[in-house]
Structures are given as C-alpha cells and as structure tokens.
Amino acid sequence: MTDTTLILGPGALGRLLAAYLGQPYLEQQNRIALVDRKASSRPINLVTPEGETLSRLVPRIAADQAPRQPMVVHLTTKAYAAEQALAVLAEHIDPATPLVLWQNGFRVQEPLTQRWQGPVLCATTTEGAYTQGADGVVHAGHGHTFIGHLGGGYSDLAKRVAGTLGTSGLAAAPCGDIRHRLWHKLAVNAAINPLVARYRIRNGQLRDRPFRPMVAALIDEIDSIMRAESIPPPEHGWEAMIWKVVDTTSNNRASMLQDVLAGRPTERDAILGPLREAAERHGIAAPRLDALWDNSP
Ligand code: PAF
C-alpha cells in the first residue's frame, strides 16, 4: 500500500477535501492526488468560511496515473456519475482499496458496498461548498461529517479516516449508524432540493407561501415512509430537523438548484428514487413525491 489518498471527482466536495487534506504539514504524512480527466499542476484556490483565499498545490492526475495501491479513495462525484467514474479508476487500482462514498441520496451506497471487493465506508456531510471557476472552491460554511460502514463494520478504518479529516480542519466522527444518518440526509434533501430547483428559489423562501404547505405535505409523506422502513426519526422529529436546515441554509442555493442553473443533470433519482421505491414496497401512497418526480428537472 502507498501513502497516497486519492480523491475521485473534482467538483465542489472533491476540491474541498483536496484543499484541506492537501495542506503542506499534512502532506508530510499523506500524499493527496485529485483524479481528474486530465493531469494538471494548477493549484486549487480555496476561499475559507472566514473569507481568506488560499492556494493549495494538489496534483491532479488522470486515472491511468493513479498509484496501484492507494491508501484510500474518496469518491466525491455526483450520485449519477459515481459508478462510471469508479469503473474507470478501478482498471488502475487494487480492487481491495478502501473506498469512502460521499454521494447524496441512497442510490450508490448499497450496490457499491456489496460489489466492491475492499472495505466501503459511507460519508454524510453538512459542509457547505461550491465551485468557483475552473480551479476554485468556496467553503461557504463549516459543517460536520459522519463516516461509517453500512453494516457497522470497519470501525478502525472509519476512525482513521475521520481522524485525518478532523486534523485537516473538517470536523468528522466515525459512526455505527450511518444507514440511518444517510436516510435522515435523504429526507432533508427530498423536502428541499426538488422544490427549490423546480421553482428556482433560495432555501429560505420555502418558509413562505405558497411553498410552506408543500414542504409540510412532503414531510408527512416522508414520515410515513420512514416509519414503514423502520428508520428512527431524528431526536426532535422530521419536521423540526427539516425546518432547522431550511433556517440554517436560508440564503443557500441548494445543490439541485445549482445543477439546474449550470445546465447539469440533477440528483433527482438518487434523492427521490429510494423514497418512492420504499413507498411502493410498503404500499404507501406518495402523491407529492410522485408529482415532484414527474415535474423535477
Ligand atoms: O443539497 C444541498 O444543497 C444541501 O444538502 C441542503 C441541506 C439542501 C442545503 O442546501
């Protein structure tokens, strides 16, 4: 095994991880490389939440330049691009390499955990970041990341990965219930993202009419589906959790709206798909989620 950490997916999250993990003092312990379409030595420009602009020299390599045995691969693509990006890299790395999946929704986590030969951890994060230009990333707000294995295994690896992130300045903790945390994030995303993308509004506008009752109706459907799936609710209930995220991100353009505005595909399937399939499995009607699916960009 080499001491190289690979980050696969040069979007906002990938650049954020590269910029933090690639700090010079950390680089003495771990080498970092960002896997991109083409190799390049252009630095990553990070704007910190405090407004400082920093330049980080993290090599960008093409998949065929990857070391055969990386220490770990952080897969940071959008959900719809994850399997294909990994398939390209997989031709060049040891199949036993540990993976960390950072995708929104709950589409790729289960199949990749079953199919990939090495250990697979999942991450769920509230770090806020967006890309700026070809090489920049704005770290809009500090968040927190949980890391764990869907079956509760590999706790030492999860602890190590979370520890490295924490040392770099991205707060993270290992957890034994990542499956529940992924469903919680999915609930937040399903109540916010498709609506704000469809109506092209900032998150905070969901608090006003005509959107507020739409969110409330979605929360009801999500609540029934989660009960049927035996996903325990968050400490203060779904409503409290979702409205709190709306409040704390009120000025944000959610990721799905950013995708629409940039003309990219959206994560509609990864976010709404698993909930609608669960509703169908349990014979629960979910007309609001269905309507969002039909009308989502
Ligand atoms: O997808 C996003 O943008 C975020 O997960 C969230 C929480 C909806 C805030 O914008």
Image (cartoon, rainbow, N blue to C red):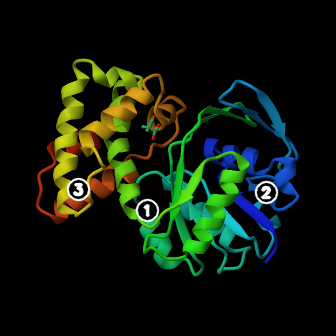
Mark 1 and mark 3: Cα distance apart in space: 15 Å
Q: Residue 108 at x, y = what percent?
A: 46, 63
Assign a secondary structure to mark 3. helix
Report crowding for label 3: few under 14, some 14 to 19, many 20 or more residues within 10 A (C-alpha): many
Q: Is residue 188 left or right of residue 82?
A: left
Q: Residue 39 at x, y = what percent?
A: 83, 53
Under 8 Å from ligand 1: the CB of mark 1?
A: no
Q: Which residue is mark 2?
A: 33
Residue 59 seen in this snapshot: no
Q: Quadrant of the N terminus?
A: bottom right
Say if mark 2 contacts mark 3, CB within 8 Å: no
Assign a secondary structure to mark 1. helix
Q: Which residue is mark 3?
A: 226
Q: Residue 62 at x, y = what percent?
A: 78, 59
At label 2, the amino acid type is Ala
At label 3, the amino acid type is Met
From the viewer's perspective, is the residue at label 1 or at label 3 nearer? 1
Residue 105 seen in this snapshot: yes
Q: Residue 248 at x, y = what percent?
A: 43, 29
In the picture, residue 135 is in which quadrant? top right
Q: Which residue is mark 1?
A: 178
